[in-house]
Amino acid sequence: MCGICGSLGGEEHWSSGAGRIQGASVPTRRAERAKRIRVINRVLSAARVTVSDWQGRFYLVAGPTGKQQVVDSLPHIWQAVQEVTGRGVDPLAQADRVNVGS
């Protein structure tokens, strides 16, 4: 599939949905996505990888050498990290060492 066709649609991953709590102030999808990206970047800081928002629908994963990859969901980020760095990253092991609270 070409890049433009892939960006036109498709099912969203469960991790991209905003939480809905009755009676509570609910963050916007964009605010929730920004928070998720901040947490991911803290977890990946030791690997010198950054993740940024791309068009409000995709993630841009950039490695320390400048290699980049566009992915569409959270699980794909971890695969892309492996591809741009040449080594795997265990996000759960990294999260133990990083304060991912807020």
Image: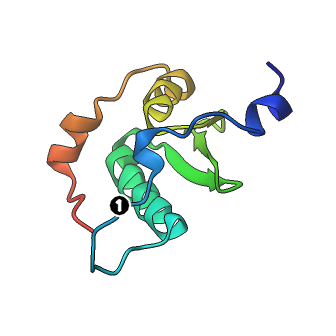
Question: 24 or 75: nearer the eye?
Answer: 24
Question: Which residue occupies the extreme left position in the image?
Answer: 96
The N terminus: image quadrant: top right
Looking at the image, residue 97 lies above or below residue 22: above
The C terminus: image quadrant: bottom left
**Is 12 positioned to the left or the right of 43 in the image?**
right
**Is 7 positioned to the left or the right of 56 in the image?**
right
Question: Which three-letter amino acid code belongs to the residue tagged 1?
Answer: Gly
Residue highlighted by disc 1: 19
Residue at x 20%, y 59% (from the top left corner): 99
Residue at x 45%, y 43% (from the top left corner): 48
Residue at x 34%, y 81% (from the top left corner): 25
Percent from the top left, x then y, of residue 73? 52, 38
Q: Quadrant of residue 21?
A: bottom left
Question: 85 or 54: nearer the eye?
Answer: 54
Percent from the top left, x then y, of residue 17? 45, 52
Looking at the image, residue 2 lies above or below residue 14: above
Question: Which residue occupies the extreme front position in the image?
Answer: 22
Residue at x 43%, y 31% (from the top left corner): 75
Percent from the top left, x then y, of residue 88? 38, 22
Q: Residues within 10 Å of mark 1 (few under 14, many from 20)?
A: few
